[in-house]
Amino acid sequence: MQIRMVGTGSAFAKKYDNNNALIETDGYRLLVDCGITLPKALHQMGHTFEDIDAVLISHIHGDHVGGLEEFAFQMMFKYNRKPVLFIADTLIEPLWEQTLRGGLTQDPLNKLEHFFDVRPIAEGVETELHPGLKVKLLQTKHIPNKRSYSFLFNGCFFYSADMKFDRELLLRLADEGVKAIYHDCQLEAPGAVHATLDELLTLPENVQKITWLMHYGDAMEQYAGRTGHLRIVEPRKRYDI
Ligand SMILES: Nc1ccn([C@@H]2O[C@@H]3COP(=O)(O)O[C@H]3[C@H]2O)c(=O)n1
Ligand SMILES: [Zn+2]
Ligand SMILES: [Zn+2]
């Protein structure tokens, strides 16, 4: 499995695009989240929406779903293919009713399934997305009373949705043999709805060594050399997991 971040920025970052990823395995290309900046950033990487086999959504914030309207329209009117959308069963209704319905509705098209091949995923159940690529959704804390799901790929790669610091979860994942943790990180405290760098730096060395920071602000370069054993994910670079 390989990962390339289309962007690594926070919701407000201007130097880095929205924190969205491409996970590739045996020629299969999964887009993880599709934010506001995704259409342009994907184009700058030399890809079109046609190159995407499926999209997986973590939660409903613009930097994670704001590019889905263009994705849906391009696939319908430019590429004549209904894209596969993997999404927690609990997010299907809010994604349509609270985010996409306004822009996409036109007679007779009035539901999410008219635009996407929707594949609901139940929390906590390891689900095959493609031969060789499985995901387990873990509900993680982000905004009170708003569901947000982090991803455990193939039992060995944890990719955080936006989430608050959860020491027990990270220690447990490391104990269970997870090889890599990609974690959203707010460089400056207070984190409020994200883990802060200071919180992640309290992790034991063995956990820090497998943990990579993403979803950071424009000040990221000032933190070079100040992240302990935590490494910073670079945008658009291909990493083997
Ligand atoms: N209660 C909240 C809600 C949101 N926010 C900020 O808005 C951003 C929305 O995208 P995000 O990536 O979840 O990061 C959120 C916070 O920066 C915040 O700081 N506090
Ligand atoms: Zn975000
Ligand atoms: Zn968020």
Image: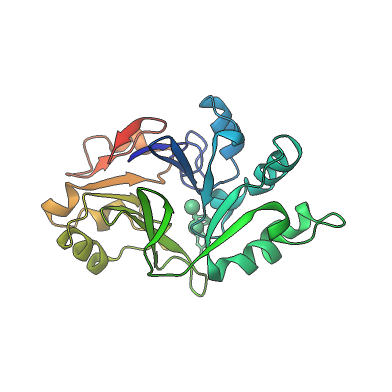
Q: Quadrant of the N terminus?
A: top left
Task: Name the spot of residue 23 as percent of width and height, x first.
Answer: 41, 42
Is residue 214 at all visible to an observer of this figure? yes
Q: Horizontal placement of 102 versus 220: left or right?
A: right
Q: Residue furthest right?
A: 107
Residue 169 as seen in the image, left or right of residue 47: left
> Percent position (x, y) of residue 207?
17, 54
Q: In the image, residue 89 lies at what x, y percent?
A: 54, 69
Q: Residue furthest bottom?
A: 145
At a point 64% along the width and 69% down the height, the residue shown is: 93
Using the image, determine if residue 144 lies above or below residue 160: below
| Residue found at the very far front of the displayed protein | 131
- Percent across and percent down for residue 240 are 28, 36
Q: Is residue 3 above or below residue 148?
A: above
Report how many numbered discs are placed on residues in the image.
Answer: 0
Q: Residue at x 42, y 31 (%)?
A: 236
- Classify residue 227 as left or right of residue 45: left
- Considering only vertical position in the picture, is 7 above or below 10? above
User: Is the image coloured rainbow, by chain, by secondary structure, or in one colour?
Assistant: rainbow
Residue drawn at (54%, 51%) of the image = 64
Instruction: In this rendered view, identify the residue nearer to me: 94 or 109.
Output: 109
Quadrant containing the C terminus is top left
Residue at left offset 41%, top offset 63%: 192
Residue 187 can be seen in this image: no
- For residue 145, side relative to residue 222 (left or right): right
